[in-house]
């Protein structure tokens, strides 16, 4: 393993590895960098990147059950449930009765949740501007479109690629 700024990273790919694998590792690294940066940006608001993402998803749509949030974010229901429970404890979300399902309550933003989400968004705008400084807007848009296309292709071909048991 090699280190970069004191952190561990996977071994470098060889010339025999497809460029797509290098791209995947770069995207995973970028995801970690963005998550850590987001965590630092909103920590004093009582948020993490994961909490912020869930509040944003709630703000973008109607109240919905945890399972629907998990599906929309493409993450595990159990993880979303844990985060939503923490957000409720901190007063950022509330549970409401679901007229369509007795047990699957609806998750909704509270006024405190709306306030903290607005504060996070106010911090995100200058952060994004600084992060994007010097980048060609057309190149950023191309990267966005390519990443979206890759995500769509991976989801379309997503199968269990682990070797099957020969027995």
Image (cartoon, grey):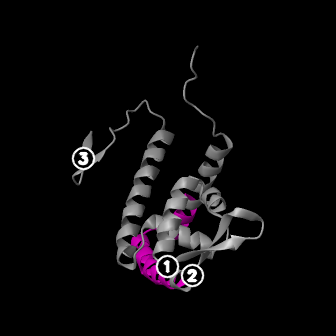
Which of the marked residues, 2 or 3, is nearer the chain's N terminus?
A: 3
- Quick check: marks 1 and 2 in contact, CB under 8 Å? yes
Asked if the magenta segment contains residue 48, the reply would be no
Q: Quadrant of residue 74?
A: bottom right
| Magenta part, dominant SS | helix
Image mark for residue 91: 1
Q: Quadrant of residue 13?
A: top left
Q: Which residue is mark 3?
A: 3
Indicate the secondary structure of the residue bearing disc 3.
Answer: strand
The outermost residue toward the top is 167
Image point (34%, 70%), residue name? 40
Residue range (magenta): 114-143
Indicate the secondary structure of the residue bearing disc 2.
Answer: loop
Judging depth in this view, the residue of 43 and 26 nearest the camera is: 43
Can residue 75 be seen in this snapshot? no
- Quick check: marks 2 and 3 in contact, CB under 8 Å? no
Which of the marked residues, 1 or 3, is nearer the chain's N terminus?
A: 3
The percent position of residue 67, horizontal first and vertical second, equals: 64, 58
The percent position of residue 75, horizontal first and vertical second, equals: 56, 54
Q: Quadrant of the C terminus?
A: top right
Which of the marked residues, 1 or 2, is nearer the chain's N terminus?
A: 1
Query: Considering only vertical position in the picture, is 83 above or below 164?
Result: below
Whole-angstrom CA distance, mark 2 to mark 3, is: 43 Å
Q: Quadrant of the N terminus?
A: top left
Query: Considering only vertical position in the picture, is 13 above or below 95?
Result: above
Image point (62%, 75%), residue name? 108
Whole-angstrom CA distance, mark 1 to mark 3, is: 40 Å
Image mark for residue 110: 2
């Amino acid at each position: 393993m090699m280190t970069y700024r004191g952190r561990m990273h996977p071994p470098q790919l060889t010339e025999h590895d497809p460029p797509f694998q290098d791209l995947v590792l770069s995207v995973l690294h970028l995801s970690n960098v963005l998550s850590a940066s987001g965590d630092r940006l909103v920590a004093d608001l009582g948020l993490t990147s994961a909490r912020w993402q869930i509040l944003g998803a709630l703000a973008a749509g109607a109240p919905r059950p945890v399972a629907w949030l998990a599906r929309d974010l493409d993450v595990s229901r159990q993880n979303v449930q844990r985060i939503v429970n923490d957000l409720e404890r901190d007063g950022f979300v509330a549970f409401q009765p679901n007229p369509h399902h007795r047990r699957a309550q609806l998750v909704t933003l509270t006024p405190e949740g709306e306030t903290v989400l607005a504060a996070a968004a106010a911090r995100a705008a200058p952060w994004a501007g600084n992060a994007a400084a010097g980048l060609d807007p057309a190149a950023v848009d191309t990267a966005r479109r390519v990443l979206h296309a890759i995500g769509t292709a991976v989801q379309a071909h997503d199968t269990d690629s682990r070797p099957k048991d020969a027995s």
